[in-house]
Image: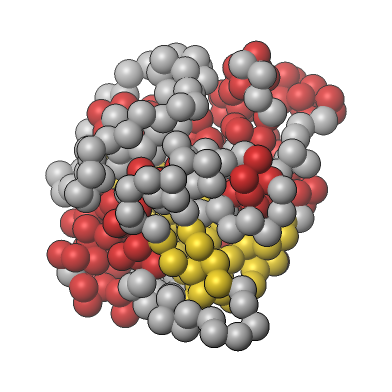
Amino acid sequence: MKKIILDCDPGMDDSMAIVMAAKSPELELMAVTTVNGNYPIEVTCANARKTLELLERTDIPVGKGLGKPLVRDVPKDPFTHGKDGQAENNLPDPVMPLDERDAADLIIDIVKANPGEVTILSTAPMSNIALAMIKAPEIKEMIPEIIAISGSFGLNKYAFLNATGDTPQSEWNVYVDPEAADLVYNSGVRLVALGLDVATYFDVNFSDEDIKKLEESDKKEAAFLLQAIRFTNGRGFDAYCTVIDCMAVAYAIDSTMVETMDAHVGVETKDGLTLGMTVIDRRHHFIWEHLPLIHVGCHADCGRFLKLLMELVLK
């Protein structure tokens, strides 16, 4: 069983990532840490706990993280997940307490207690992870892997058609806190970046049979996903928007779900047209080898991904 920490900003798709991670028999969810991103920190903190209470998994600690990027102001997300941040599912206010440690300290403590064993899943701006590395740089050698919904690499048409940041070719998680992303990309920790090229595929859609199974299920999480799909479709978006962050969980469960390529990648931290871009150097000659070498998702098996997701939701 793989030990993981899920650092997230729920968000309906982060909420579904929590569902997948908490229900997977292959994963041990050690903690959920929250950060400003899709919504302010108070909302993301509440939504993480709402989701765990929905699943009756209040044994999993939740750590409250940073309410703003490392050095920047909080940008406004052009995409909405509804008034509650969870596609108008309107779950009850949480009663489970937050962990007494903040998110960065919770990450540090868990990694140090389990050196070499804890994979970090990042489905949000990397502010908490970067802060943990700043506070305790020694943990970088103790983290076997970070799997992140991060970046947009231009490997197919979806990378930029579905750009989620507020510059033309950026992805939201990097755009919100590019300095944090730059620090983590350059940390030396093995990084698998599942960008919009594989996480926002129009092929990630639900069939009529899938919808029927969700409707017939007595699972609260099935009802949650069904409402999220209806909410998203009602706003003119495709259903992949409800499960973008779930791709990181799927990869943690089965790394053959996504084909990756090694690439030198830099994060643009300068303000302007390209802020938040993840620039990949694919040249034959004169490549910038000082850019960090990471593992970039280039092809996902969307059919297997949806099958796994449905199995866990209905489980």
- The residue lying at 20 percent from left, 49 percent from top is 71
Q: How many marks?
A: 0
With respect to residue 109, does 291 lie above or below?
A: below
For the residue pair 103 and 96, the one nearer the viewer reads as 103
* Position of the C terminus by quadrant: top right
With respect to residue 310, does 228 lie above or below?
A: above
Residue 188: x %, y % from top left: 37, 77
Horizontal relation, residue 54 to residue 131: left or right: right
Q: Quadrant of residue 132?
A: bottom left
- The residue lying at 65 percent from left, 83 percent from top is 284
Could one spot residue 167 in this view of the protein? yes
Horizontal relation, residue 314 to residue 163: left or right: right
- The residue lying at 39 percent from left, 67 percent from top is 185
Could one spot residue 20 in this view of the protein? no
Here the colouring is: secondary structure
Residue 200: x %, y % from top left: 64, 43
With respect to residue 282, does 309 lie above or below?
A: above
For the residue pair 201 and 122, the one nearer the viewer reads as 201
For the residue pair 20 and 180, the one nearer the viewer reads as 180
With respect to residue 241, does 229 lie above or below?
A: above
Residue 65: x %, y % from top left: 24, 44
Residue 152: x %, y % from top left: 56, 53
Horizontal relation, residue 313 to residue 131: left or right: right
